[in-house]
Amino acid sequence: MQVFSCMRGRAIYASPRPAGHPFPAAGATAAFAPSPGRRRCLGSRAFATPRRRAVTDGIAKDRLEKLQALRSAGQDPFPARVPRGQPIATVLDDFASRHGQSVTLCGRLGQIRDFGKLRFSHLQDRSGSIQVGFQRERLATFWPERRRVESNDLVSVTGELGTTQKGEPTLWATDVVLASKALRPAPEKWHGLQDTEQRYRMRYVDLFANTDVRAVFAQRSRIVREVRAYFDSLGYLEVETPILQPIFGGAAARPFATHHNALDMELYLRIAPELYLKRLLVGGMERVYEIGRVFRNEGVSTRHNPEFTMLESYEAWADYRDVMDRVEGLFAHLVAKVLGGNGTVAFRGRDYDLTPPFQKARYLDLFAQQNPGVDWFDDAAVRRRARELGLPHDGIAPHTLANDVFEATVEETLQGPVFVHDYPVAISPLAKRLTSDPRVTERFELFVAGMELGNAFSELNDPIDQEQRFVEQVAHKNDETPGEVDVDYVTALEFGMPPAGGLGIGIDRLCMLLCGAASIRDVVLFPLLRRVDPDAAADAAATGPGTASES
RNA sequence: GGGGGCGUAGCUCAGCCGGUAGAGCAGCGGCCUUUUAAGCCGUAGGUCGCAGGUUCGAUCCCUGCCGCCCUCACCA
């Protein structure tokens, strides 16, 4: 079997590099301080200036001058420590009772509203923001240098809690300590940072400028924590298995290849942890799960990032029906702990009720509904239907084509949440066959909003069957399948693996759903982007039009 | 890879039929002790993504390239 369209995977593939060092798209030249730019050492472009907006220009220049003024005055613009405060939210919580209290708060300064002898700003930390009032009469030492501390700087403010005439909770500052000078201004106060490219490349700005973005990632953190809590509560052990693997497997996807120098060994970044986790079942670890990064060297889209986070769990003495219960249990847990309310989320313009139980539908029944009169196992009929649908069908294996027809006709109808179960064996190489019908397997996938969220099955534990499937896979090797049989895995099965139910869930997609995020890049802190290389761009342009062919 | 869209000041955006670019915010200078998108006066800030082409003249039209977004395909 060559094409396993299935497997635990979800999202996609990626480069091992952490998403990128931002080279702000706009820009002039020069860089501040030791430029981290390109390190070309020879050649005519040795001194090419990276297009990083220099901090010595424009607004940044003003800030740099303030910084230097502070230094000349003997002040450290980046002190190792400043008076530490408490979270702003705790102060706001029972503000009335704290009236008159003296507190210290730390955070990032917003814009300053200057009234001459009185100025207001807001101070923001991870928990919230509060107005700060700076009055000349309360700030004898700080007042003369107030202009050296400005919007976007990080500060520690000590003062007295009170209100303004309009009742706004305010920290009336009595002492201000600059904690870190910002050389670049914050984005515009009202619109924040809008440009999607800038938001992804400079996520650090996106995060402090757009509070809703921070909320999404806080939510993601909560989701992951509660996924752990759920499996922990059932006695699962969280484990970590190799990311560097000599033979990749457990899914159908192109891997990233790398090399270990000391061992002089080719290695792959894992496309799935599956085969190692099942070795643990052999070892007697009867309930295990792993939440970890997997890498697939393929396309990028709103649902696919080359590196993504996968949950896989395995439970001995369970089958796929039990796993279905686990999934419903997990969603019930997440609805209660993360979502709150009635368990409904808005996603891509529709509402979805994530409260279990979920619908269930047989794969072949769904296929028959959308393709009346076409037998999934009838090659000729499937081919006819594929032609009718305008699908490419030449040189495509029958079972693959049949699944293509399924995907073309059924998937978009799966608004769900719905469990699609009992998949044909030809597209389910790691799942156990149904005793009642050996053409299909004990396998299900969970769909929501036409998106595959989870994949599970009764794990194949017959080493003879498994070896045959591997051998056949190697015989039809392509770049999505390993070049050799994972002999060690077969050996492990020969020692006896208990019957087990396994599950894979794409954490990023789960977060998309629970956060109402339309793109996976909105739930991945640093999504993979093409590197912006000004020199390469210049080279390409230089050889482009006039001189070269029309290529 | 195909199709569509976008790229203008630090940020958010205008810029008509081709005539060498504007606003708000941020910045700088000034006034102001209750503002909260503070206000008022003044001021500075641009490789219009990059490179070519057409034109007397290009942010605008054409070509190539770079990057991002959407979409299809591949792929989960």
Image: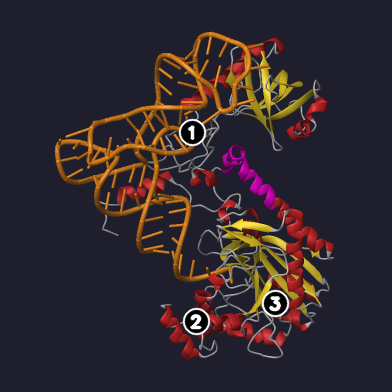
> Rounded to the nearest whole Å, what is the CA distance between mark 1 and mark 2?
54 Å
Instruction: For mark 3, give the secondary structure.
Output: strand
Which of discs 1 and 2 lies nearer the camera? The answer is 2
Amino acid under label 2? Leu
**Which amino acid type is marked by label 1?**
Ala
* B19 lies left or right of A195: left
- State the extent of the magenta-drawn residues as a range: A203-220
Instruction: Name the chain under label 1.
Output: A
**Residue annotated with mark 3:** A457
Residue A434: x %, y % from top left: 70, 87
Residue assigned mark 1: A31
Q: Residues within 10 Å of mark 2 (few under 14, many from 20)?
A: many
Residue under disc 1 on the same chain as residue under disc 3: yes
Counting residues from the start of the chain, the first of labels 3 and 2 encountered is 2
Tell me which residue sits at (82%, 61%) in the image: A232
- Identified by mark 3, the residue type is Phe
Q: Name the chain under label 3.
A: A
Of labels 1 and 3, the one closer to you: 3
Picture quarter containing residue A341?
A: bottom right
